[in-house]
Image (cartoon, rainbow, N blue to C red):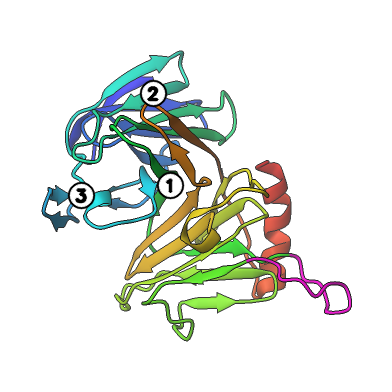
Amino acid sequence: MEKVSFLNQPNCYRLSNGTIEVIVTTDVGPRVVRYGFVNEENALGEVPDASVTTEFGEWKPWGGHRLWVAPEAKPRNYVPDNGSIEFEADGDYTIRLRPPIESPTDMQKEMTVTLDAAGTGVTVHHRIINRGLWGVRVAPWAITIMSGGGETILPQEPYRSWDETVLPARPLVMWHYTDLRDPRWSIGKKLIRLRTDASLNQPQKIGILNKQGWAAYLRRDTLFIKSVDYQESATYPDYGSNAETYTAGSFMEIETLAPLRHLEPGDAATHVERWHLFRGVLAGADEDALAAALGPLIAASR
C-alpha cells in the first residue's frame, strides 16, 4: 500500500498485488477511483468536473465506485461528500473508509476494499448505519461509473418454453425516461445490453431482479464483472430490482442493490460485491458468441 495522488486528490492510497491495482481516495467519498491492470487504463470512469447543484450544495460524482442509500430521492441522495474521510489500513491489501455522519440524513456510510493477494479479484464491503433518532427503511446501493465506450451486460433468466412453465421469471423495471426503442439497447433471449453513445445524451435506465447474481461491462476486449448474492425471499428496492444500469452520453453506471431493511437507530445494513477484470475477451459477432465467451469468465469470477 502506498500513498499517491489521483484525480488531483493528494491523499489517495494504492493497493497492488503486481497484476491489478486499486486506488481509493480519502479526500472525498468514500470512493474507489481506480481499478485496472498495473500500468494500463482505468476500467472505472473519471468525471472530476461533473456536478449536481442541490439545496444542500454541490454534489460531485468524481467517478469510480461509490455507496448510496436506496431508494433514490432528490436532494437526499445528493448531499455533498466532498470532505476528507477517516481511513484504516489492515495489512497490505485492505483499507477501510469511513466518512463523517451525513447531515441532514443522519446516515453513516462505510466501505472496506480488499484486494486479493493474486489475480484480479477485489471484495468491496458496503455498510450503512442509521445514526438518526427514528427508524428508516433503506438499502445499501453500490454504484460503479465505468469508462465510456463500452456496454453493460445483464443476464436474462434461462429461457424456458411455455410447455415447461407458465410463471413469470422476474421483473424488468423501467423509469419514466426509459425508451426501449433507443438504439443503445439490445435485448436478446440470453442477455440485455446497454451501450454508451457520446452523441446521445438522453438518459436510459432499467432495473431487473437479477437471480444470476452478476453484471458486466465490456469495453473493447476488457471485461469487468461484479458479482453479488441473490436473496430469494428478500424485498428489493425499485419494484424488486437488485441490479440496474444507467447511461447518458459517454457516462455509464452499473449498480447493485441489497434488500430493503428497517433500520432502527444504531442498526446497520451491509452489501458485498466481488469484482474481477479480464482482458483479451473476444465478444464475437452475435449474442450467442458473446454469451459463450462470458460463460467461463462468469464461472471463474464466483
Q: Is residue 168 magenta?
A: yes
Q: Amino acid at mark 3?
A: Lys
> In this figure, which residue is indicated by the disc labeled 1?
141
Note whether 217 is above or below 258 in the view shown: below
Q: Amino acid at mark 1?
A: Trp
User: What whole-number distance in Å separates the C-alpha atoms at marks 3 and 2?
Assistant: 21 Å
Which quadrant does the C terminus fall into?
Answer: top right
Give SS at disc 2. strand
Give the magenta part as a residue range: 158-170
Residue at the image point whose x is 17% and y is 55% from the top: 51
Q: Which mark is residue 19?
A: none
Note whether 198 is above or below 146 in the view shown: below
Q: Which mark is residue 60?
A: 3
Residue farthest to the right? 163
Residue at the image point whose x is 68% and y is 49% from the top: 232
Q: Earlier in the sequence, mark 3 or mark 1?
A: 3
Q: Position of residue 207 (x, y in %)?
A: 50, 64
Q: Is residue 245 magenta?
A: no
